Image (tube, rainbow, N blue to C red):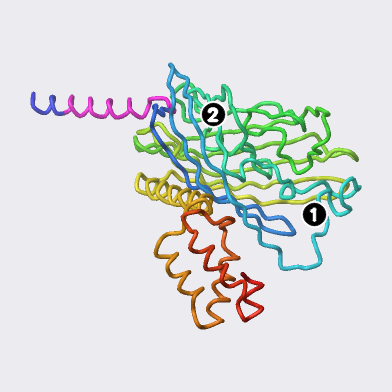
Amino acid sequence: MLTNLLRIGILGLVIAGGSSVFAQPLRYNIQPKQIIAYNVTITATTPALTDTLQGVIVYTGTEVAGDILTLEYNGGLRKTTKSAASTGGPRGGFGRGPGGPRGPGGAGFPRSPFDQPDFRGLVQSTNTLVITNTGKIESMRGDSQLPYLLGNLSLMPFESLPTEAVKEWADGNGLTITSGDNSNSRFGPRFGPFANNNEEEVKTGGGENVTYKIQNDDGKLVTIAKTYVMTSPAATSKDTGFNMNGTGTYVFNRELGVPESTDFKIDLTVDSNSSQVKVPITVAWKRMSEQELAEHQKLVAEEKAKLAELATRGSRPIPPDDLKKILEHLASKDDNVILRELTDLKRSTRREILKEDVQLVVQIGTLLTHKDEKIQDAA
C-alpha cells in the first residue's frame, strides 16, 4: 500500500513538473556568438505577374543585457518575376510603368510595389537589432524593407510574445505612413505600393492587429495560430487605400528560445481611383539545421573567393603553365590558332601586362609585322 502511494506521489510530481515546463512563458534567448539562419520564400501574385523572393537570412547574437538582446542581421532575398500568360496587360491592376499605366506623374493607378528599385530587403544588407526577450523592437540600425507591405525582412521572424504564460494574446497599434521616414516598426512607412518618393506629407490612420493562439506545445516546439489584419483609411481621389488579412502558423522553439518556422497566407487589397487589385501573398521561412547552415556558409565563402579572384586576376602575373600555352599558340604555324589566341586575350578581364609577363609582350610585338593583316590588326 505504501509502495503504491509512493508511486502515485512520484507520478504526481512528474506530471506537475511536466506541466510547469509547459507553463513557462515564451522567451527569445539568443546568446552572444550564437548563429541562427532561415531559408525564406515569399510569393506575391498580381494580375500582371508573380514575384518570388527567396534567400537566406542569418542572425548572430552579440550581446545580452537582462531581457534585452542585440543581434546582427545579414541577408537579403533575390527576386524572380514570371509574367502572366495574358499579353494584354492588367485590367484595373498595377501598371507596367514607374508611375502606373500613364507613366510618371500620370493619373493612373499608383506605382506598383515591384517597380521601386530601392527595397533593401532585396539586396544583401546588414542590420543591428535591439529587441526584448518578448519581441518588442527597441531599436534598429539599417534597412531591409520588402515590397508588398511586408516590412523589414530582418524583423520578420520575431513575433510578439506574451509577458505571461498564456495560451492566447494579441498585439496591435495605430498605423502611420510617412513617405520620407525610415521606421523601426515591422511595417515601416516606405514600402507601400502607393508611396511617392518625393512626398513628405504624413498620413495617419488605420491600424494593425495580430492575434495568437497556442495550438500545440510538446515542450520543445510551440505551434501558434496567427491572424493578422492591417487597414488604412478609405481610398480617396488622392490617396490609395489598402487592407491586409493574413492567417497561418508560427512555430517557436521553446528549447532553444528562437523562432523555428512560419507558414502564412495574406490577402492584400489595394484600392485607388475606383480600381481594386487583390494580391495573394505567401510567406514561409524555416530555421536551418547546423549542417544546412555550414553548407550555406561554405557556398558564401566560395562565392566571395571567386569574386575576389575576378577582382584581382588582372593585377596578378599569368600562371606559368597558362603563359607557356599562350606563347605556344602565338608562335603557331597555324594562323587560325594565332588569331583565336589574340581574340581570347582581347576578351580577357586583364587590362595590363605585368613585367613578369614580358615574354608575352615580345611575342605579340613580333606579330605586328605578320603576313596576315587580320593578325596584325588583332596584335
Q: Which residue is depicted at the point 81% across and 38% down?
A: 196
Q: Nearer the viewer, mark 2 or mark 1?
A: 2
* Dot 2 alpha-carbon crowd within 10 angstroms: few under 14, some 14 to 19, many 20 or more: some
User: Does 219 appear above or below 55?
Assistant: above
**Position of the N terminus by quadrant:** top left
Span highlighted in magenta in the image: 8-28
Horizontally, residue 218 falls left or right of residue 140, namely left
- Residue 13 image offset from top left, x and y in percent: 22, 25
Quarter of the rendering occupied by the C terminus: bottom right
Q: Where is residue 93 in the image (x, y as percent from the top left)?
A: 80, 54
Q: What residue type is labelled 1?
A: Gly
Q: Where is residue 40 in the image (x, y as percent from the top left)?
A: 52, 47
Sequence-wise, which precedes: disc 2 or disc 1? Answer: 1
Rendered view: 109 above or below 254: below
Q: Is residue 320 left or right of residue 137?
A: left
Q: Does the magenta stretch include residue 13?
A: yes
Give the main secondary structure of the magenta stretch.
helix
Secondary structure of the residue carrying tag 2 is strand
User: What residue is disc 1 on?
Assistant: 93
